[in-house]
Image: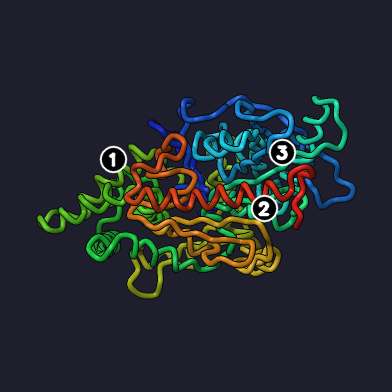
Amino acid sequence: MGMMRLSKCLVSLLFLVALSGFTHGFVMSPRTLLNRFSQNSNYYLTTEEHWFDQTLDHYSPYDHRQFKQRYYEFLDYFQVPDGPIFLKICGESSCNGISNDYLGVLAKKFGAAVVSLEHRYYGKSSPFKSHTTENLKYLSSKQALFDLAVFRQWYQESLNLKRNKTGAENSWFVFGISYSGALSAWFRLKFPHLTCGSLASSGVVLAVYNYTDFDKQVGESAGPECKAVLQEITELVDRSLESNRKELKKQFGAAELEIDGDFLYFLADAAVIAFQYGNPDTLCTPLVEAKKAGEDLVAVYAKYVKDFYVGTFGVSVETYNQNHLKNTAVNEGSSDRLWWFQVCTEVAYFQVAPSNDSVRSSKINTKYHLDLCKNVFGEGIYPEVDMTNIYYGGTKIAGSKIVFTNGSQDPWRHASKQTSSPDMPSYIITCHNCGHGTDMRGCPQSPLSIEGNAENCSAPDAVNKVRQKMIEHIDLWLSECKGTGRSSM
């Protein structure tokens, strides 16, 4: 899901968002923090680009325009010719390759090929040379799902041509984290004949208008001491904004954020990423110590924001600037505008402050989000949350053979399916630093842990137990449709 302001992070060390979503995730993206992947080439299974001619509008009987869509394939572990094909869905950010997370381990175990399709409009897969609001009308999860279905068919046929076969079907399985985790679940729901099953890691399948549970989970994940300090900092910042606005924003290196809501969102997200991506002590330890020592809490938090969130984590302050979001140019920063369009039309995930006991500023409210949508995209742009949930089912999704996984500390998990139902098992991985996509990414969830290494999780056994369950489901569902490539449904 990542859900997630998306990552325009030009990362200095090991990073990429999201999400992003994924990042992200869902549900995550500095504003949405759905997703974050490494840009270091050592952290990819492959970065070799391939291209596919995709239909622009799958719902029009007369518009036959196409665009170039980027994809990747990794065949090192593929057991030719009958091994399974793992389709890894890219989410709400530029897809720069197939990251070397736990999917690589699964591909090796099952002798699978891995293919990954970049989401329409993101990265190098934009149908247009300008992202005006009018040109964004083909950007939706529904179009993206059709992209995946058409690509899946085309790739299977291409494989058959290489083998000189007709009508052969490998067994397919779909994977995604965050927003792409939701897409993974929705793909199995809408195209059950095209995949044996799906993994929805931190899959944000429930569109939420006012997502107050997000902030509540941040408080729970922080724990009483750290939460109290964060709330005190919020109060001090709100007060200082009234009397010392310019100097305060300069202190955080965010003078460009003229709109107070943008600035407050930036500060809120800086805290969120510590829990979402498995680095809680990086935030909480210095804050709690500073409180005990009677230090200037705003100054200590400003140091964390500049050193870790902007410095190490690689977030650009510009990501939060509505003037930047208005930029219709197609470039590396486009994902911010693109994800916000999806937020403002389909899923909302408005991360508003709860009416009491909130960690973030109460000024981050519904009006702030609606004003942003109007300011950035123009009149008439409004998130059709009810329609999205009617179309997909939300957490009452009537699918089958979908595994849902979530990390206990992840604020996005409340937009996922957290209870099991027949043929749709759901697992929550509980540990101190288990956040967004822990089952696939290990700990921390960012920066990337090679092969999703779980050794640095506070409870590695909790991660490994869920992974074993995932393997059992994948194994069973692949065996049930082996030879047809189709699910028995």
Mark 1 vs mark 3, CA separation in Å: 37 Å
Which residue occupies 79% across, 44% down? 484
Give the label on residue 127, or none.
3
Q: Is residue 258 visible?
A: no
Which residue occupies 52% across, 58% down? 372
Which residue occupies 39% across, 43% down? 454
117 or 8, nearer to the observer: 117
Judging from the image, what secondary structure is the residue with disc 1 in? helix
User: Which residue type carries mark 1?
Assistant: Asp
Which residue occupies 65% across, 65% down? 397
Q: Earlier in the sequence, mark 2 or mark 3?
A: 3
Mark 1 vs mark 2, CA separation in Å: 35 Å
- Image quadrant in which you'd find residue 489: bottom right
Give the label on residue 141, or none.
2
Give the label on residue 185, or none.
none
* Percent coordinates x, y for residue 420 in the rendering: 56, 65
User: Which residue type carries mark 2?
Assistant: Ser
Tell whether label 3 touches label 2 (CB within 8 Å).
no
Residue located beneath label 1 in the image:
307
